[in-house]
Image (cartoon, rainbow, N blue to C red):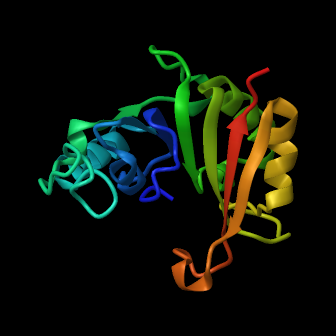
Amino acid sequence: MIRSGELPVGCALVPGCGRGYAVAALASAARRVTGIEISDTAKAACNAHLASAPAGVGGGDGGAPGSAAVVVASEFAACIADDFFTHAPSDGPYDLVYDCTFLCAIPMERRGDWAAQMSALVRPGGELVSLVFPIGDFTGGPPFALSPAIVEGLLAPVGFEPVSLTEVPPEQWARGRKEYLYRWRRKTE
């Protein structure tokens, strides 16, 4: 999806970004990326990774068009320590938010808060891409069970419309279980 060039450029957010692999993959001269972690320790680990990781998928995507130069992700990205639920970007809403298994770590009673905050963080016409995992109807967590229907039930009422829903092929499952990539656009009304 990143290589296709179909994702919005501008400012992007990756909440609960961990070591920053997705932050680095999304970073480019056309897309500035902010990762959020709750602790200073996690922030430092992410920023250390960004200082040595190539920007963009496959490296080299961060430089000028036609350039084979490898640019480190920290040129276009950084991680901050902040609370996702109170985060307010100083430059206004984001063009793109990527939720890579962040929602599944949030207790069920906070899922409505997650959806409301996503609506506040994504500009009208901007996109939210969510990796929906783990799929199931089990209790307990984290990770807490998800499904495309659960995500739709959270996002449709707060002004998002689906763009695409793609089942991740089994050979690409990063966690050994079924995953979906759900792409949403915030309505401009």
Of residues 1 and 149, which is closer to you in this image?
A: 1
Of residues 92 and 124, which is closer to you in this image?
A: 124
**Residue 100 position by quadrant:** bottom right
Q: Residue at x 81, y 31 (%)?
A: 158
Residue 42 image position (x, y, % from top left) = 36, 45
Residue 15 image position (x, y, % from top left) = 52, 41
Identity of the residue furthest to the front in this view: 66
**Residue 88 position by quadrant:** top right
- The answer to whether residue 186 is left or right of residue 41 is right
Question: Where 39 sits versus 151, above or below?
Answer: above
Q: Residue at x 40, y 32 (%)?
A: 81
Identity of the residue furthest to the left in this view: 69
Of residues 88 and 72, which is closer to you in this image?
A: 72
Of residues 33 and 138, which is closer to you in this image?
A: 33
Question: Where 80 sits versus 128, above or below?
Answer: above
Residue 10 image position (x, y, % from top left) = 43, 31
- The answer to whether residue 135 is left or right of residue 76 is right
- The answer to whether residue 102 is left or right of residue 11 is right
Which quadrant: the C terminus? Answer: top right
Residue 19 image position (x, y, % from top left) = 36, 54
- The answer to whether residue 140 is left or right of residue 13 is right
Q: Residue at x 53, y 31 (%)?
A: 95
Question: Where 158 sits versus 156, above or below?
Answer: above
